Every structure is written in C-alpha cells, then in structure tokens.
Image (cartoon, grey):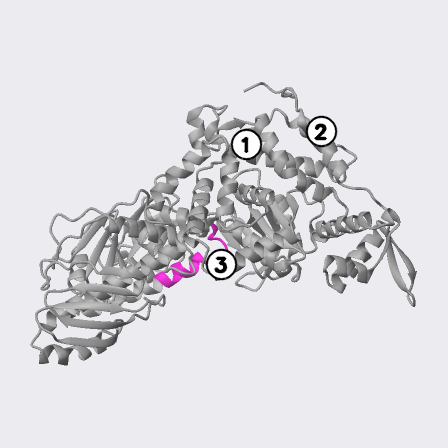
Amino acid sequence: MEQKKEIIKEEYLERLYQGFKNGLHSPKSEKPRAFLQNKGLDYNWINVGFNSGQFHHRTSKEFKKPYIELGILKKSEAGVNSPDKTPFTTFGRYGIIFPVYNRENRITNYYAYRFEIAIPKGEFLNDEGLYPNYPKPLTKRLFIVPTVMEAASFVQSGILENRESVLSLFEYEWKEQIYKAIDSLDELSEVVLINCKVPDNEFPLGVPTVSIQLEETINESYQAYGTKGLLSMINEKLENKERTPNSHNAGGDLSPIEVLSDHEFIYKGEELEYKIFGVIPENPTLLEMQFEIRSILGEDVLRIKLNLMESQKVQKELFEWMENNDLNYGQCIIEINHITDELQTLRKIKLQGELLPTKGHCSIAQNKAKEILKQENLFETIDKLLGESGIIGEEKNRLLLFIIAASYKFDYNMHAVIQSDVKETASELVMQIADCIPETDRYSIDLTTSRSFRYYGKSVIDRKLLVIPDYSGVTGNKAISDLKRLQSKGAIVNDAPRKTASGILHTIKQEVHGHASSIGACQNSKKYFENEPKTVVVGMDLSLDKMQQLMEYDCKKMAGLINHQGQEKAKQLLRYIIKNIHPMEVVNPYASKLMLPLDLPNARTLTVQLLNFVSLVTLFHQHQRETLGGKENASEGQFAKIQTTKEDIKIAIDLFLSAIVVNVDELDFTVRSFFEKLKQMAGNSPKGKKTAFSSLDIREELKLSKTTVNRYLKTLVEYEYIKKIGFKNTGYHYEITNWNSLDALKKVLKERFENQGEPKRMNRQSA
C-alpha cells in the first residue's frame, strides 16, 4: 500500500514537472530564461523548469488535493474576491525548478531557486532523492558540491568524463541517502569534495577522499574561465592535495606510476613490476598499451597487450598466468586498476599540456594580468602577447582588433570588419583574435537564416563578442540588415504575429538586446559597411613579406617547432587582462580637439568612432589612474569615472589612423593596395606617368589571377583613377590619370592631432 502511494506521488510530481518544463519555454518566461543564461546554464541542455505559481489557478478541489498533500500547495492569507474561494501559495513560486530523483530514476522531490525575491535562495520540497540523479553503478570518481546550482553548473560545463559523476548536498547539508549512495558504488575509487565541509562522521567505507576549495563558486569559475579553465583549476587543486587513506584497501598505499618518457612507464607493486610501453591515446574510450609484467621474486615474465578500458578481458587474460605462478591475483587487479587511473590522469595532463596553460595558471595568470595592467608600456606588452599567441605580423592591426573585440564589456562598443580578398587568411586572423577573449564571452556565427537575429532574445548575445569568420554566411542569407541594425543600435524591436489558443491572431512586440562587439572578415566591405556608425573597416596586410612570414610559420608548425603551450599561455593571460578591466565612464576633456575635418567623407561617423576608441584605450589604463569618483566607486566600475590623458590620445591615434584612412577612401582596401602597386610599376617604367599597361603586363608583374586583375581594373576605371586605351580587336591598355595619394591625408590628420593643447571644458564643471 505504501509502495502504491509512493508511485502515485511520483506520477503527480512528474506530471507537474512537465508543466514547469513547458512553462520555461513560454514567451512570458523571459526573466527565468535570462537568469539561467546569465548563470551560463542552457535550459535546452540541463533538466530544468519554471514555476510561475499559477498552475492551480481556476482548477477544482480534486485537482488541488494531491498537491496539498505533497506540500506543493499551502493555504495563504492573501485576499480573495469570493468567500467560497481558498487562497493558496505554491512551493517555489516564481522560481527555477530542478527535479530530484530517487534510485529508480523517478522524480521524488523538487529543488526551487527563487531568484526574484530580495535575497535569492533555494529550497527543497522534502528530504528525499539526489540531484542530478543517483550515480551510475560503475562510477569510479564522485564529485560532491554544496548546492544544486553548483551541480547544474558542473553538468553544464561538460567536464565529467566516463565513469565520473556529481552529487549535490542539500544546501551544504549531508543526508543519509548520500552516504548510502556512496556505500553502493563498488567501483568507486575516489570522492572529491568541492567547496564542501567534510562531514563530522567518516565515510562508511573509508573511500579515499580529497577536499578542495576554489577561490570562487563553481558557477563563477565556469562563467569566467570556461570548461578548460574550470577543469584546469580542479586538477591544479587535486595535485596539491593529499587523499585520505582507504581503510579497506587490501593493497595498502599505492605509489604513483613513474614516467620514463612519453611512451614508457614503470610501476612497482607488492609482488610484480609492470613496464608499460606505448603512446597514451587521446581518445578517452581507448587505453591499449603493451605490458611486460615481471615477478619481483622470480623470473616469471608476461608480455601482453592489454586494453585497460575493457576490465573483464584484462582480468581474464591475467587470471591463468597469476594462478600458474602462484601469485596474488586480487592484488594484481587492484594494481592494474590503479595503473589505469594513473594513465588516465596522465592523459588529462598530456591534453592539458597541449591545449591549456601550465599548472597553477589560474592564480598566477590572475596576478600577472594585474601586474601588466599597471605597467607604463601596457600596450607594448599586450602586443607582444598577441605575437606570442600565434598572430603573425599585423602589429598595429592586431592590437586595434583586440581592443575593439574587448569593447563588448563597455558602453563604447565597436565592431571591426577585416577587408581581404584572401578569405582563409582573414578568417584565420578573426579566430586568432577571438581566442584571446574569454571563452564564455564569445558567440560564433558561421551560417544564419534571414531572420535569425530577431529571435535571440534579451541575453543570448548581450555583452558578448560576436565572432563571424566569414560574412558570406550572413550576407548570403540576407541577414545583414538585421545584423547592422543590431550593431548600430544594440537592439532590434519588431512586431510579430501570434495566434491565441482560440485561434485569434494578435501582434506582439519582440525585443533583441545585443550590446556587443563583433569581429569578422568580409570581401566586399564597402558595399555593406560604409558609413556604419559603430563599424570600423580594417585593411589586412597581404604583401609578399607578410605571405612569406605566414608560410614560414606554417612550415614550422608542421615541423613541430612551434611552442603551442607558450601560445596558449599567452592567450590565457590576455583573457585574464580582459577579465580585470571593468566598465567605467570616460571623461575626455580633449574631445573637441579630435574632430575630423568636415570636408572628409563620413566625418561625423569617424569622429564618433575615434572618440569611442580613445575611451577604450583610456579604460585599459584604469589600473594606473585615480578615478574622478573616488576609489570606492572605482571598485564598482560602472559608477566610477576616469579621465583621458594626452598619452591615451597619442596611442589611440597611432592605432586608429590607418583605419580612418581606409574608411575615408572611396576605394576599398584591396583595390587601393593594387592601385598603389600600379603606381610603383609606372614610376619604375622609363615612360613614367605616361606608361600604359596591358592586363597581361600587370598579371605577370604582380603575380595575380586574370579575374582579380580585371575586377580591380574595372573598379579603377569606374572611379576614374585610370583610363582604358585601345580597342577590343587590338587589345586594351590602361593609363593612370589620378595620381592622388592618401599619404597627404595621413600627414594632414597627424598634424591636426599632434598638439591637442589644453583640455577644453565645454561648459562642464571639472571633476
């Protein structure tokens, strides 16, 4: 009878949870979705719902009765409009709902996190079940975290590997079922407590345990450093901690495996010595190695290839040899399992060595980043780090692009478009710059539909860097108009039809918030981005010297001469630099001195872009300046103010001047580069400025394809920079008619900006 009642309870909880889950996807549930996204939790990935507190409205007493018994509905003192009605309040009203499961994988409990109340808090419906679920029987390592939100973040991060599980405490409290769950895991070899207090009573089985404390919560660490950073921090803490001994370990203390080389290992057990040969495979499902097992007391040797991930086959292979030589089979299996764990740990370290910075990077990089931000030669150091991260050449452009990419954090956000005819090279630069931005702050776009940008909601791309390696994936689907609107205004507001349950159409307002920065590559930048208020077109160096540098780097990479660990370390340090720069208001007393001449095309747009870029440079120096609002406000960031100096302006102009010239030029950057080379050809010719070239002459001299040369020549003829001479039957020649150069413009702008003079207060009180 009791079991039947329990089954009915689970059915009610599961039925109601399905309603909570559907409620999270309702158009009205924007706040809970935004909360989850701000926590870095994907509601399409983890199991979660939302209780609006209205599921019992306009329902019968029979419907309410089981939920009253379960404690989900409770009578309240709220007023009602009829004496016949009884007011109720719900468990976890307007809260995020996580299901808690029993051993049979049925929902037996809820955890609600009420995020809208003055002090957000979590609560359980009862004391039953485990979250996210009972660990699988073959679990070898179990992580225990203090709260359900922490466990959800752990699952979301994706760091759990095969035969690893995670359990949440009951808001830092240990329950009997947690001990029983640990007791039931026969294969369990280690328990890791993260930010938890070790319980007063010892674990029932004396399972080896280690307790680690992260500097931040798991959720904060995951959002700040991403999956790789969180995994690296946990591994770093584990390496520096001693395990509690396993009182039931028949094999006694097991020593670590000895690494002789990347393909040779040795382990000494009680009776046996194990020599292991082979490269540890990166595939986590494989661990096949060649073993030479030798008895310490005798001459018996077993040479065999074992796949350590197939434990039953390994045991079968070893049993007969162990029995024939009168050796301790049970101890051998314990040692083989230990060797397997050690090799898997080495596999993680190996992958970490290739993809992640060195051990201890989290605290070291944090302190190093703060030191760099206080250096006088800050931007020289950042540029050096960009070079060390693998970005070849582009000394000024890479620093300009990095600053613009980081602008999503501030009110002065900007967007960069790299103009290049070599799509692969430009896309590679985009990805290299993006890799220097924190992983959780990036949103990549390769392909999109014509209306995709209208359905991102209020938080998906807000305060993010949009990474667009090739704009053809956006322009080809006619989504470029929506993207440009998002880039310039930071939001899209549009009306959309919706149908009610009764089939009546009505109009609703949909809003997309996208205060973001972006970086992308585009071949036809003039067509799509000319005079866009926040978008800067940047020309990419495609000279022969640059191509030579890139080819030499590719060859070194294939020859194994590139220090990938050093590159990753530089990227990680750049990410920490971004994390330590906070939003502030910039006061620029020299703003009136930075106005561009009115006779320049798009003078107002470019002036605003220059002022925004000066503000970004100023913000990078915030750790070296006193804030106008005082140090207390400085710590809060957004309320503090910082003042621009002449040094900020000098750095900004040095970096941004080339971008101004590219955006002022009526020719796009690639055509302009071609035209400058054409003028050099004419200057080196005996006829000088009167030289006329055929298309073939140009192709042979500049080593360009016929299609590319003809496209450039057609553009130059249209803009009257060259004229076409001859006839179709005799062949055409081209003569330069416009010898104007942008060098004169650069000189004028430099002279204009060289001396800003004393700051002009513009009828504003000095701070």
Residue 151 forms part of the magenta stretch? no
Magenta residues (range): 17-31
- Look at 15% across and 62% down and name the residue there: 183
- The answer to whether any part of residue 104 appears in the image is no
What is the secondary structure assignment of the residue under circle 2?
A: helix
Residue 140's spot in the image, x, y percent? 23, 63
- Which of marks 2 and 3 precedes in the sequence? 3
The amino acid marked with disc number 3 is: Lys
Q: Answer with the quarter of the image where residue 205 lies.
A: bottom left
Locate the C terminus by quadrant. top right
Read off the residue under disc 3.
557
Give the spatial CA distance, label 3 vs label 2: 43 Å
Q: CA distance from mark 2 to mark 1?
A: 22 Å
Callout 2: 10 Å neighbours few (<14), some, many (20+)?
A: few
Local SS, label 1: helix
Dot 1 amino acid type? Thr
| Residue at which label 2 appears | 751
Q: Callout 1 environment at 10 Å: few (<14), some (14 to 19), or many (20+)?
A: many
Question: How many numbered dots are placed on residues in this image?
Answer: 3
**Quadrant assignment for the N terminus:** bottom left
Image position of 524 with respect to 370: above or below: below
Visible residue check, residue 189: yes
Q: Position of residue 637 (x, y in %)?
A: 46, 32
Q: Is residue 501 left or right of 667 when viewed as pictured?
A: left
Amino acid beneath label 2: Glu
> To which quarter of the image does residue 471 belong?
bottom right
| Residues under numbered marks 2 and 1 in contact, where contact means CB atoms less than 8 Å apart | no
Q: Are marks 3 and 2 in contact (CB under 8 Å)?
A: no
Q: Earlier in the sequence, mark 1 or mark 3?
A: 3
Pick whichever, 429 or 68, lies toward us.
429
